[in-house]
Image (cartoon, helix red, strand yellow):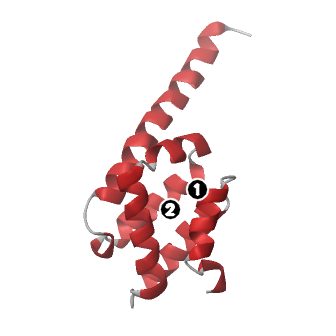
Amino acid sequence: YHPEEVEPVERLAQLRDTFGLKMVSSLLTLQSPLALPVEVLEVLYLLFRELPFDIIKKALEPQAFRSLTALFQHFVGGTDNLSTALVGCKIMRAIHSQPDLTLRYLVLSHGALRW
């Protein structure tokens, strides 16, 4: 055990958390959920899949949470683009896999598991 070996790992975790916290909120509120490019949706999917749950929860402050809800509505009822629907499905699965009942309910309330 060497302290200098632990510090970079901890620093990397801090950077990941700070980056994730800012990016999830920023990407969700960047523009109307209906206009988000597939590339942005792919990044959101990776963030929701890889970030620790507590960071996701913090990032989903009220405005970002509303944007996420609107994005889900777009996925299940408003998109005619197959790429968007596929990434939407992946995002919803990543969110549904989180241990938070509120987030799981959000996915289920949009009927996502049916499609």
* Residue closer to the observer: 32 or 94: 32
Percent x, y of residue 78:
39, 86
Instruction: Say if mark 1 contacts mark 2, CB within 8 Å.
Output: yes
Q: Write the residue at 63% across / 17% down.
A: 6
Crowd class of label 2 (few under 14; some 14 to 19; many from 20; radius 10 Å): many
Q: Residue furthest left?
A: 31
Which residue, given by chain and number where applicable, does mark 1 sit on? 49
Disc 1 on helix, strand or loop? Answer: helix
Disc 2 on helix, strand or loop? Answer: helix
Q: On residue 69, which mark appears?
A: none
Percent x, y of residue 63:
35, 54
Crowd class of label 1 (few under 14; some 14 to 19; many from 20; radius 10 Å): many
Q: Left or right of 111: which side holds 24?
A: left
Q: Write the residue at 55% across / 20% down.
A: 8
Q: Left or right of 114: which side holds 18?
A: left
Which residue, given by chain and number where applicable, does mark 2 sit on? 45
Q: Residue furthest bottom?
A: 80
Hey, which quadrant is residue 89 in on the image? bottom right
Q: Write the residue at 30% across / 57% down.
A: 29
Name the image quarter holding the C terminus.
bottom right
Q: Is residue 79 above or below residue 45?
A: below
The three-letter amino acid code for the residue at tag 2 is Tyr
Percent x, y of residue 81:
39, 87
Q: Is residue 91 above or below residue 2?
A: below
The three-letter amino acid code for the residue at tag 1 is Arg
Hey, which quadrant is residue 114 in on the image? bottom right
Percent x, y of residue 1:
74, 10
Could you tell me how far apart the alpha carbons at marks 1 and 2 are, in whole angstroms?
A: 6 Å
Q: Write the residue at 55% across / 30% down.
A: 13
